[in-house]
Image: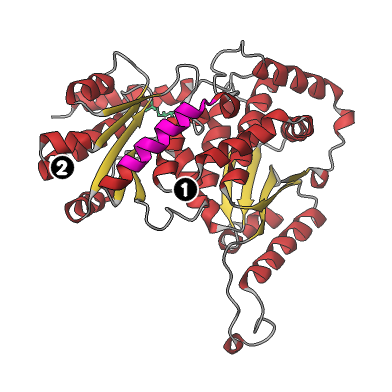
């Protein structure tokens, strides 16, 4: 993996105050003493026993179902969905993973309910607090369905719960009903929980190698070279924000990274966006979005910088049929995709748009583990460096309070 910040025009050495702050904040993160940083050492501290447990539970799930429904919202689902999609879905012979509980659309749930009638299913509800409205409601609706289909005993054997709160409703439910229960560590927040059972169980059920993912994370966490690279990225982000570039556009030319983009949006927006600070993180899928927002990028209000995730080796390709005519006939689809990618980098650089390029050799478990850890640490360092707490989200509570009042008035 390579990180190229040269397209931002920033000379890190001219920003020594930010550099010093970022290095101090990195040490704070790695010290083991700061609140909510239990995730920082996760790639190292996993005992073989823990991974074996996850793999055993995943095998058990695989033996029971073709469809594994994961219920969760925000950090309780985005990481595993991002990884599974990046790896092109479930491996052959492993259950299909679908996600629910991240919205309250009855139409969305209806489609899942229909599939539950015909397919062998297991259910996993993931909520650290155990009280979040969307997953809680979805869980109760789908739990009834699964119990109706399989009966109380077998139904409950098909339900898995991942939670933290020992006195929460979800925890009590799981104990009472005899569901398989897994823990989310206290000091790991939702959006930093991919390397816990929250992310690892669904990924393992889909047949992917979770050990390789952790090795990728550990590689970033343990090398001096990577420390410098991720800090340079974090420093660049802070400097760009100071220069008025208050939107970070993540972008890629690989549709399988669409949910990785959703994960990045949450990671950066919830970690940095507070006290009137932070860069608004968004993600575009190219070349699709070049035909919609591409115009804005090239000639619109220049309040943004770009972070392009560029995948070098693609797993699949097509040869363009002769019937497509010149200049395409006989060429590789992915080579043409790469021409569009190189074209955008040149066009945007020539127009003075700051662009960071993250080059990934290929989309496998190891490199995805690296990407996740790279962005998690850079995000936490940037947030500390702009002076906010990366690990809370007080703003999210505001809409919840308004919603609860309205729900209580419902008849
Ligand atoms: O990153 C976070 O902490 C949040 O996005 C949470 O993951 C999200 O709100 C879901 O919370 P819970 O797992 O408690 O249901």
Residue sitting at x 56%, y 46%: 365
Residue sitting at x 80%, y 50%: 352
Looking at the rendering, which quadrant does residue 238 occupy?
A: top right
What is the magenta segment's predominant secondary structure? helix
Name above or below for residue 281 compared with residue 43.
below
Label 2 CB less than 8 angstroms from ligand 1: no
x, y (%) of residue 92? 41, 58
| Circle 1 residues within 10 Å: few <14, some 14–19, many ≥20 | many
Residue sitting at x 28%, y 24%: 404
User: Is residue 173 rendered magenta in the image?
Assistant: no
Q: Is residue 99 left or right of residue 361?
A: left
Label 1 CB less than 8 angstroms from ligand 1: no
Numbered range of the magenta stretch: 46-60
User: Is residue 51 rendered magenta in the image?
Assistant: yes
**In front here: 16 or 153?**
153
Give whichever of discs 2 and 1 has the lower sequence position.
Answer: 1
| Quadrant where the C terminus is found in the figure | top left
Q: Is residue 74 in view from this perspective? A: no
x, y (%) of residue 9? 84, 43
Q: Is residue 263 left or right of residue 330?
A: left
x, y (%) of residue 174? 24, 24
Q: Is residue 66 left or right of residue 279?
A: left
The residue labelled by disc 1 is 84
**In front here: 242 or 319?**
319
Residue at the far top in the pictured view: 33
Residue 246 - label = none
The residue labelled by disc 2 is 145
């Amino acid at each position: 993996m390579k990180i190229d910040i040269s397209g931002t025009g920033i000379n890190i050495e001219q920003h020594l105050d930010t550099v010093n702050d970022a290095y101090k904040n990195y040490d704070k993160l790695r010290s083991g003493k700061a609140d909510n940083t239990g995730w920082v050492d996760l790639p190292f501290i996993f005992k073989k026993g823990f991974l074996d447990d996850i793999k055993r539970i995943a095998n058990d799930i695989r033996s029971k179902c073709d469809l594994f429904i994961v219920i969760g919202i925000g950090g309780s689902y985005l990481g595993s969905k991002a990884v599974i999609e990046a790896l092109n879905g479930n491996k052959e012979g492993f259950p299909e993973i679908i996600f629910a509980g991240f919205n309250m659309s009855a139409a969305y749930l209806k489609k899942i309910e229909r599939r539950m009638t015909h397919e062998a299913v297991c259910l996993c509800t993931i909520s650290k607090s155990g009280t979040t409205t969307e997953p809680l409601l979805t869980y109760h609706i789908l739990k009834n369905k699964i119990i109706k289909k399989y009966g109380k005993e077998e139904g409950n054997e098909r339900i898995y719960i991942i939670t933290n709160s020992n006195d929460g409703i979800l925890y009590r439910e799981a104990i009472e009903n005899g569901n398989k229960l897994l823990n989310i560590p206290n000091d790991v927040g939702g959006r930093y929980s991919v390397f816990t059972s929250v992310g690892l169980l669904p990924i393992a059920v889909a047949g992917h190698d979770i050990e390789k993912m952790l090795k990728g994370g550990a590689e970033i966490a343990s090398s001096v070279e990577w420390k410098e690279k991720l800090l340079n990225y974090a420093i660049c982000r802070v400097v760009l924000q100071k220069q008025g570039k208050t939107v970070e556009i993540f972008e890629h030319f690989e549709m399988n990274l669409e949910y990785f983009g959703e994960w990045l949006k949450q990671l950066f927006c919830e970690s940095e966006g507070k006290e009137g600070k932070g860069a608004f993180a968004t993600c575009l899928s190219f070349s699709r979005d070049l035909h919609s927002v591409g115009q804005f990028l090239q000639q619109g209000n220049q309040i943004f910088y770009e972070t392009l995730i560029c995948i070098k080796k693609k797993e699949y390709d097509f040869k363009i049929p002769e019937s497509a005519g010149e200049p395409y006939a006989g060429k590789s689809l992915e080579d043409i995709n790469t021409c569009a990618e190189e074209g955008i980098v040149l066009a945007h650089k020539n127009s003075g748009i700051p662009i960071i390029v993250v080059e990934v050799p290929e989309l496998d478990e190891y490199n995805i583990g690296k990407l996740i850890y790279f962005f998690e640490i850079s995000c936490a360092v940037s947030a500390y460096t702009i002076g906010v707490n990366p690990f809370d989200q007080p703003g999210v509570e505001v809409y919840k309070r308004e919603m609860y009042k309205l729900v209580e008035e419902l008849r």
